[in-house]
Image (cartoon, helix red, strand yellow):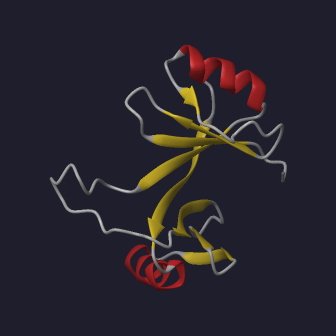
Amino acid sequence: MIGHLCTVVIDCPDPDELAGFYEKLLTLSRQADTGEFVMLRNAAGAPVVAFQRVDDHRAPRWTDPARPQQMHLDVMVTNLDTAEAQVLALGATLLDGSDKPIGYRVYADPVGHPFCLLTPQEP
């Protein structure tokens, strides 16, 4: 095992508005809200879904390859360097600007979908 799913992050033009929709739909509550990023948690207090502002957001269009889905997975790991070696061996690619020693790093899966490896420490 490399890590465990921590959060699904969804791009959107207004994190507060979209988080409000999912709070009601999924019976979740706000864990964090910076204006640019809102995280919702479940009744046990675990993060579940987050929303991040994308200024030039173009809404996805189902089955339109020019307007694909816009979300990524956050995977919690205990050691970024160890987990990085493992995901690279599986075919992932470290994306530019993602060489942080703690906190998180961003990768692309073998077909280009982004995902983040996170550590419990704050960057």
Residue 88 as seen in the image, left or right of residue 108: right
Quadrant in the picture for residue 102: top right
Residue 67 as seen in the image, left or right of residue 84: left
Quadrant of the frame with the N terminus: top right
**Residue at the location (66% across, 66% down)?**
45
Q: Residue furthest left?
A: 63
Residue 32 placement (x, y as % from top left): 69, 74
**Up/down of 98 relative to 7, above or below:** above
**Residue at the location (55% across, 27% down)?**
93
Please tell me how many numbered marks the rendered image carries. Answer: 0
Q: Nearer the viewer, residue 54 or 51?
A: 54
Residue 116 placement (x, y as % from top left): 60, 43
**Up/down of 65 relative to 39, above or below:** above
**Up/down of 90 relative to 48, above or below:** above
Q: Nearer the viewer, residue 48 or 65?
A: 65
Residue 81 placement (x, y as % from top left): 77, 25
**Residue at the location (83% across, 37% down)?**
101
**Residue at the location (47% across, 84% down)?**
20
Residue 27 placement (x, y as % from top left): 46, 77
